[in-house]
Image: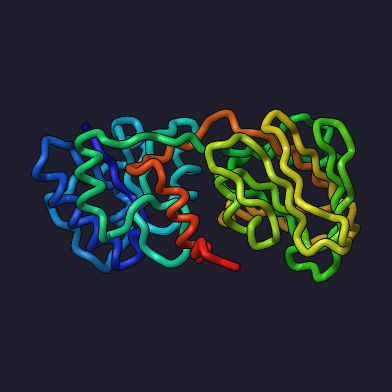
Amino acid sequence: MIIGCTGNYRKKEYFTILEKIFKLVSDSNTKFLISDDLKKNTEIVIPNYYQLVKFEDIIMKADILLAIGGDGTILSTVRRMGLKQIPIMGIHIGGLGFLSEITEEDLEFCLTEILKKNFFISNRMLIEVGMKNKNNNSNSLKKYWALNDIVIDHGTSARVLKIKVNISGNYLNTYEGDGLIIATPTGSTAYSLSAGGPIIYPELDTIAVTPICPHSLSARPIVLRDIETITIEILSPDDGMALAIDGQICFSINKNTILNISKGKYYAKMVNIKKDKYFLTLRNKMGWSGNLR
């Protein structure tokens, strides 16, 4: 087995966990490849026994990729892998997080299970967004992918944002408010949840549309089939609106921007050790005691 490793090398906890993984893996016949992104941290001395490899080479060679960090690290790593999605396991450092499977406390147990190949993989749907200018005669779309969500909001403008939404050619609604969230089931427990959207089991293939602070009591989230295409037009005359992909990549958009959002052509592959871990994580993160009256 070949295990690759990447993560948030800016955090000091990263190096503590990385060294623990190295010691655990070195006792086996496993090859351990570390992303050479580590070289960007000039404040540390990299041990000469680490095998540093370009990220692109790791995803071509590794059977599993470990991502040390928070949910943001996993989101950026999945997007960085592009079409070559290999199984990824998150090792959590940070605050609130739903995506990381293990923590430093259960690292030894979980890594031992991986070495024994006692794990399973859950496929997580991605969504893609294509952007074009309606004044441009070209039909080409710039496309980007998200594991969590695509968010349209008023950006630097303080005015109410007016958004027209069509579903596979059928008019749905014109939303007025602070914006709109298009979320995957994985992203249903992120921004969409904070805006009043539903919690969706992560291995389902659906797309949720959640308005942000709508100026209408009748505006409610809606869950769509994964085969639908969502077309969004900005009706607000002002500039300064923004599009965010997984909260990490941002673009300025305006009234001439047309967005087409649909299911991505590939899945992220998340490594899981325990089959009931999602519900345990959900209860812990949501603070559910199971005994409310």
**2 or 40: nearer the viewer:** 2
Q: Position of residue 79 (x, y in %)?
A: 50, 43
Quadrant into which the C terminus falls: bottom right
Quadrant into which the N terminus falls: top left
Residue shown at 20% from the left, 38% from the top: 115
The answer to whether residue 222 is seen in the rendering is yes
Tell me if residue 227 comes above or below residue 237 in the rendering.
Answer: above
Residue shown at 58% from the left, 28% from the top: 265
The answer to whether residue 251 is seen in the rendering is no
The mark total stands at 0
Tell me if residue 128 comes above or below residue 173 in the rendering.
Answer: above
Looking at the image, residue 21 sits to the left or right of residue 70; the answer is left
Q: Position of residue 203 (x, y in %)?
A: 53, 37
**259 or 122: nearer the viewer:** 122
Name the image quarter holding residue 162. Answer: bottom right
Looking at the image, the residue that sits furthest to the left is 27
**161 or 276: nearer the viewer:** 276
Residue shown at 51% from the left, 38% from the top: 124
Looking at the image, the residue that sits furthest to the bottom is 158
Q: Position of residue 138 (x, y in %)?
A: 79, 31
Q: Position of residue 193 (x, y in %)?
A: 64, 58
Looking at the image, residue 69 sits to the left or right of residue 266; the answer is left
Protein image colouring: rainbow
Residue shown at 85% from the left, 31% from the top: 169
Name the image quarter holding residue 146. Answer: top right
